[in-house]
Amino acid sequence: ERTLNAVMIPIMAQGNVTYKRLNAIVDLGCYASYILNSQEKSPANGPSTDYDFLLARDHRYEFGVLAGGGFYFDLKPILFQLSARYYYGLTNMMSPVYMNHKPDDSRLYQFQISGSLFFDLGSIFAKQPKLTKK
């Protein structure tokens, strides 16, 4: 079992469909990441050890595509969002090993579920229009 710590930069487009206060969102895009470090744990539940990257075998850069969706409720000035994304890696993290003339890939796949709570600070500091009588 290996744990990777990485910095990831997603670039995506987000579509939005609104019905009253409920909004559905769809995400499509790509990402790039750089692996900072890694730890490895043996199958026999031994202690975790640092994994040493070898330039001839391991790749620290990764590129891939992502897709996701979710929804958010706009409760003015609070916004609650729940979303899920699937990341599909396009690069091999290690040089492929050939088994029966087929490369054994080492791509990363990730499924992420997140919840967020936003507060609209603009609603506090925005000037409200004044009503006047004629």
Image (cartoon, rainbow, N blue to C red):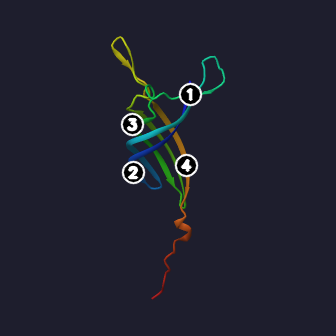
Closer to the camera in the image, 41 or 24: 41
Q: Nearer the viewer, residue 80 or 92?
A: 92
> CB of mark 1 within 8 Å of CB of mark 2?
no
Nearest-to-viewer mark from 2 and 3: 3
Q: Mark 3 falls on what kind of element?
A: strand
Q: Secondary structure at mark 4?
A: strand
Closer to the eye: label 1 or 2: 1
Disc 1 marks which amino acid? Tyr
Q: CA distance from mark 1 to mark 2?
A: 45 Å
Q: Where is mark 3, residue-wise?
A: 64
Picture coordinates of residue 107, whole percent (x, y): 42, 28
Q: Nearer the viewer, mark 4 or mark 3?
A: 3
Q: Which residue is mark 1?
A: 51
Which badge, 2 or 4, is on the more N-terminal residue? 2
Q: CA distance from mark 3 to mark 1?
A: 23 Å
Q: Is residue 29 above or below residue 108?
A: below
Q: Identify the disc placed on residue 17.
A: 2
Q: Tally the marks.
A: 4
Q: Looking at the image, is mark 3 or mark 1 nearer the viewer?
A: 1
